[in-house]
Image: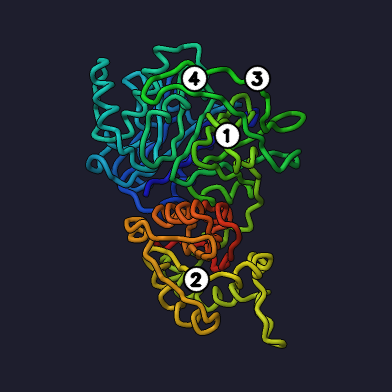
């Protein structure tokens, strides 16, 4: 499970040293996800080229390499606006090595660089197409095909904006991904998108945000799949931009733990959102609209605190979380259990209790330890509700095309709220008209957002995975 982190400062002077430290610290917050190599991409000293620095091993090894190249990177120079991207890689295509690490580049001139969390299932077809166009590959990764594909489209359509190029790229990709792009042709701009992998952006300004929503800009595109089409231009100007002086900082990340020390204002992206930052303005684009699309993205205020993701006096996060179990149980019950009158109040599902009472069957669906918790709960639920309770492993559930009905209530259990099989099962049940209840430990996660109602277990962040 890779980690993505990107930092964009606009009209906010920072030395290159500060930018590199910020990128490295962002990666350190994502180390718990597991990885075998790390890398960053920042502007070169001439501000015309992109410097890509990668190394296999720990983030600390990358940090040492950055210190060795500090003179070359001009770390004492101050820049008012800049875009830097960083990545921790867990090898899926190709062995752990510097050449297979991210950012991956479009060519030796680093015209386009990209970081990626996920797996592109049709990358071999994309790679073959590009090889036939004269491109050669230096790594074994699926991500390099993405970098070269965006370069190919740019070479054919140099009038496209950065965001339009990425829209064309994701139409050709199959699989799960969260992507973040940087280019020498579009200085100080950043484009990010996701499908099936988590991605958020933190927003930091000196003044209070003027809005807690970012509207969506739509592009109507009916082009045939597999053909790079001409993109109709959009005349809408819906976007988020800071007020007055417009100084602003943005933080793209796979996980809120990487941004909480900088800001508690975050926006979670949905599948196929394309986020574009240019001149300090964040705009979100989609190629199509649907009846259930909210047409805007809400800016959330995180309740997470920095001390929750620090080890404190413990040597390991696993050790810390073991000793915090009693506190986690209390936090889960706080404000919900009334021992005086023997009642339980779950605000997240309160409005749906009548509908739940009318159901014919309860289904508990999860993976791993979430599945085990469902097995442990089944007997109690059957005794209390006198309803049949089915417990399903999400991956098996999808393989069987399980019958699901409108009078079913389906509980989806996931600590992260991003478990891929569980999320796919949720969408399957939702299409069949069942009531969806999400039980997660991560506010703003995909399962949290796509459920009709739910319960947040308040156990604190899980770092010791």
Residue receiving disc 3: 235
Q: Secondary structure at mark 3?
A: loop
Q: Looking at the image, which residue is at 45% across and 77% down?
A: 378
Q: CA distance from mark 4 to mark 3?
A: 31 Å
Q: CA distance from mark 4 to mark 1?
A: 38 Å
Quarter that holds the C terminus:
bottom left
Q: Looking at the image, which residue is at 32% across and 47% down?
A: 90
Q: Is residue 432 above or below residue 119?
A: below
Q: Secondary structure at mark 2?
A: strand
Residue 410 in the image, given as x and y percentages of width and height? 50, 64
Q: CA distance from mark 2 to mark 1?
A: 33 Å
**Closer to the camera: disc 1 or disc 3?**
1
Residue receiving disc 4: 47
Q: CA distance from mark 1 to mark 3?
A: 16 Å
Residue 7 in the image, given as x and y percentages of width and height? 53, 36
321 or 374, which is in the foreground?
A: 374
């Amino acid at each position: 499970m890779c980690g993505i982190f990107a930092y964009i400062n606009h009209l906010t002077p920072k030395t290159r040293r500060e930018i590199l430290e910020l990128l490295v610290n962002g990666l350190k917050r994502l180390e718990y996800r597991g990885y075998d190599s790390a890398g960053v991409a920042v502007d070169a000293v001439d501000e015309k080229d992109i410097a890509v620095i990668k190394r296999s091993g720990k983030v600390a090894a990358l940090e040492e390499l950055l210190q060795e190249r500090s003179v070359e990177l001009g770390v004492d120079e101050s820049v008012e606006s800049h875009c830097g991207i960083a990545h921790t890689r867990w090898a899926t295509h190709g062995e752990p090595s510097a050449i297979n690490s991210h950012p991956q580049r479009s060519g030796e001139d680093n015209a386009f660089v990209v970081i990626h969390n996920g797996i592109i299932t049709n990358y071999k077809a994309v790679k073959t197409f590009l090889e036939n166009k004269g491109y050669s590959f230096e790594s074994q990764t699926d991500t390099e095909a993405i970098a070269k594909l965006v370069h190919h489209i740019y070479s054919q359509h140099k009038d496209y904006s950065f965001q339009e190029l990425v829209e064309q790229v994701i139409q050709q990709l199959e699989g799960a991904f969260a992507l973040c792009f940087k280019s020498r042709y579009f200085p100080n701009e950043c484009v990010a998108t996701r499908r099936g992998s988590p991605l958020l952006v933190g927003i930091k300004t000196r003044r209070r945000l003027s809005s807690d929503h970012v509207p969506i800009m739509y592009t109507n595109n009916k082009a045939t799949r597999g053909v790079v089409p001409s993109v109709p231009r959009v005349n809408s100007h819906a976007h988020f931009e800071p007020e007055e002086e417009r100084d602003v900082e943005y933080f793209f990340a796979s996980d809120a733990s990487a941004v909480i020390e900088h800001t508690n204002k975050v926006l979670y992206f949905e599948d196929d959102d394309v986020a574009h930052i240019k001149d300090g303005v964040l705009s979100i684009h989609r190629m199509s609209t649907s009846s259930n699309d909210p047409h805007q993205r809400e800016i959330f205020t995180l309740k997470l605190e920095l001390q929750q993701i620090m080890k404190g006096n413990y040597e390991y996060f696993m050790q810390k979380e073991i000793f915090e179990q009693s506190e986690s149980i209390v936090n889960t019950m706080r404000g919900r259990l009334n021992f005086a009158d023997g009642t339980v109040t779950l605000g997240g599902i309160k409005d749906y209790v009548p509908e739940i009472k009318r159901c014919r069957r309860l289904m508990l669906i999860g993976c791993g330890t979430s599945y085990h918790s469902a097995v442990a709960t089944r007997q109690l639920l059957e005794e209390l509700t006198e309803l049949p309770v089915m417990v399903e492993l999400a991956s098996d559930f999808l393989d069987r095309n399980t019958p699901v009905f409108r009078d079913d209530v389906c509980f989806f259990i996931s600590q992260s709220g991003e478990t891929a099989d569980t999320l796919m099962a949720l969408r399957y049940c939702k299409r069949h008209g069942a009531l969806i209840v999400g039980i997660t430990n991560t506010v703003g996660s995909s399962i949290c957002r796509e459920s009709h109602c739910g319960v947040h277990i308040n156990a604190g962040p899980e770092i010791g995975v």
